[in-house]
Image (cartoon, rainbow, N blue to C red):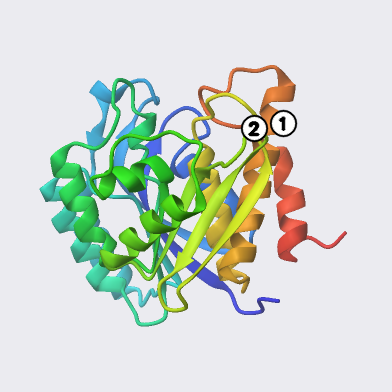
Amino acid sequence: MMNERKRAALVGTVCGTGRRSMAAALPVLAAAGIEVCLAPACFEPSPAAEDLRRDLSGELPACADQWKKLGYSFDAVIFGFPETEKQAGVFSHFLNAFREKDNLVLLGSSGWNGRENRSGPAPEETKLARRFCAQAGLAILPVGDAAALLGEREHRGPWDRKTVENVLCGVCSLGAKSAVATGVWFSPDLMGSAVYDSESGNASYAFSHRIGGEWPGAGDLFGAAMIAGLLRGMHQSAAMQLAVDFTADCIRRTRESGRDGGFGLEFEACLPKLMSHLGVLKQ
């Protein structure tokens, strides 16, 4: 049971429409009883309007300075991979301002596989992602993106345990203490994720029944649920299973609703169950 209040800094994209990016992660973390401080690095009116994206990362140093003046510290700093060298410098400044020995730095899903007409990261993105893995307490990547980060050929599954664990070890060899791969499946019936801890050398897996289709925003919900579990004191493997189950519940509810899931998942009705599992909501 977590008695003291936890606080997390969430650095990322604000999307004006849809249940994605910060709009998805914030309510999940808040439902877990975690105070969230937002630092928008990018704004886009909708997920389909990449040409209207506005880079806000230049505002992050002033945000960090103000928070430092207020005496803020964080139990977790959550952010995605930078897309440009300029963003990388700004992100590094932010991390240096709030990085502490025991606080968790989480790198979220890259979304490379989810970009239209893109099969993998551009060379500049790969270089920056590899550099930032060295600063991560925990890196979460779709398994195909993690393989691409290491220069592996494109592969969309099914996977095998040896390949998945080699990929996770490779991400940790870049400096991350732990690495999580999402979108892992060995058979058509199950979908889940795997985590590798570089200190113990152990890997563990979490699965749920597979629901076919493309589900944008699932990675944002998974990452938020996993960080919620970790900040509530759960072990990595337990927090990962919680995140897999929560994400699967959100996908199932979205599919059963008959609505288009292209703008994100209908996660709101799944929050009470998540809160109950975390001990926030007593039933």
Q: Quadrant of the C terminus?
A: bottom right
Contact, mark 1 vs mark 2 (Cβ under 8 Å): yes
What quarter of the picture does the N terminus occupy? Answer: bottom right
Q: Is residue 126 above or below residue 78?
A: above
- Seen from this angle, which residue lies furthest bottom? 101
Question: Residue 114 at x, y = what percent?
Answer: 39, 30
Most foreground residue, 192 or 254: 192
Quarter of the rendering containing residue 55: top left
Residue, x 38% and y 40% (percent of image)? 144
Q: Residues within 10 Å of mark 1 (few under 14, many from 20)?
A: some
The label on residue 253 is 1
Looking at the image, can residue 31 be seen? no
Give residue 63's position: percent from left, percent from top. 27, 59
Q: Earlier in the sequence, mark 1 or mark 2?
A: 1
Between tags 1 and 2, which lies in front?
1
Q: Please, what is the three-letter code of the amino acid marked with disc 2? A: Glu
x and y percent of residue 254 in the render? 67, 27
Residue at (24, 59) in percent of width and height = 132
Secondary element at image label 2: loop
Q: CA distance from mark 1 to mark 2?
A: 7 Å
Q: Is residue 149 above or below residue 250?
A: below
The label on residue 266 is 2
